[in-house]
Image: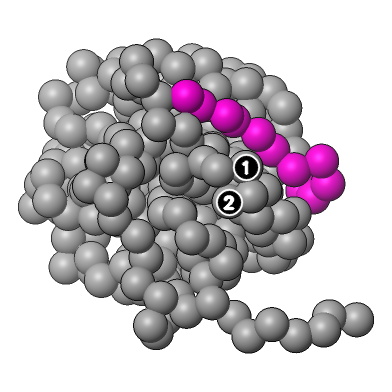
Amino acid sequence: MRIFVINPNTSESVTEHIRRELEKIKRTDTELTVVNPEHGPVSIESVYDETLAGPPTLELVRRANEEGYDAIVLACFSDPALDAAKEISDIPVIGIEEATMHMAAMLGHKFSITTAFRSRVPTRDLHVRLRGVESAYASTLVLNMSVLEMDANPEKAKGRILELARKAVEEEGVEVIILGCAGLAGYSEDVERELGVVVLDPTSVALKVAEAMVDLGLRHSKIGRFARPPVKEIK
């Protein structure tokens, strides 16, 4: 099984972090390729960043299809260009946000999501409704740390997550915490051990969903929402 993991930002440090953590949990028969675009934002912390990241990410989706991979993981919690990627792909494309929100709703009564900055809270609110899991959503926890800072300073990130998540568990009855950034890959075990609730690393969840979808021979339906776009000249 060959799985193509795309970090949609251009940070090689974040990409290497993702590769290192996924290599620990992949199946022995899973071959991983973890890449990032050469051009685009170095981190994704706004809708503007998501939009800029879209075209180079879609080029990598095309590459994965052309090179015979079995599935694609889109490793950014905003799932930039996810629907477009599903339209142009003949193999499953798993967005880490979409997969993990659904997983969280299955694992506990209420979940909370960490995010970098307060400006991202409305996006989380909108995406929860888009994914159809609003009834299980409690809150978004604002770390006030950039994506690159989370990657570079894991102890500070874990400390901030613990502070906010503990309050959510005690005051809001939250049972599941989603680490809402691919740069937090590998942090979930330490946080879960401290809090005693389920803590989800979205990139790890998405990889395992990808492996399962390949085993089951599943594909995106192509008769409606994810139908292939009409071929046309682009000037």
Give the labeled residue for mark 1: 67
Residue beneath the point at 24% across and 55% down: 102
Q: Judge whether 224 appears above or below 201 on screen.
A: below
- Residue 56 position in % (x across, y down): 75, 54
Rendered position, 115 above or below 2? below
> How is colour applied across the structure in the image?
one colour
Q: Is residue 6 something that shows in the picture?
A: yes
Q: Quadrant of the C terminus?
A: bottom right
Q: Position of residue 7 (x, y in %)?
A: 61, 40
Q: Is residue 132 magenta?
A: no
76 vs 113, nearest the viewer: 76
Q: Is residue 184 above or below residue 36?
A: above
Q: CA distance from mark 2 to mark 1?
A: 6 Å
Q: Quadrant of the N terminus?
A: top left
The disc placed on residue 12 is none
Q: Could you say where residue 131 lies in the image, as x and y percent from the top left?
A: 32, 68
Name, please, the residue furthest toward the right: 235
Position of residue 17 in the picture relative to residue 197 (left or right)? right
Give the image location of residue 136, x and y in percent.
17, 60
Q: Residue at x 16, y 46 (%)?
A: 174
Q: Nearer the viewer, residue 215 or 126?
A: 215
- Dot 1 falls on a residue whose secondary structure is loop
- The numbered mark at residue 65 is 2
Task: Answer left or right for 148 relative to 191.
Answer: right
Q: Is residue 75 visible?
A: no
Secondary structure, mark 2, is: helix
Q: Bounds of the magenta span?
A: 31-41
Q: Residue at x 28, y 50 (%)?
A: 217
Dot 2 alpha-carbon crowd within 10 angstroms: few under 14, some 14 to 19, many 20 or more? some
Question: Of the residues shown, which amino acid type is indicated by label 2?
Answer: Asn
Q: Splitting the image into 4 quarters, where does residue 137 fall?
A: bottom left
Q: CB atoms at circles 2 and 1 under 8 Å apart?
A: yes
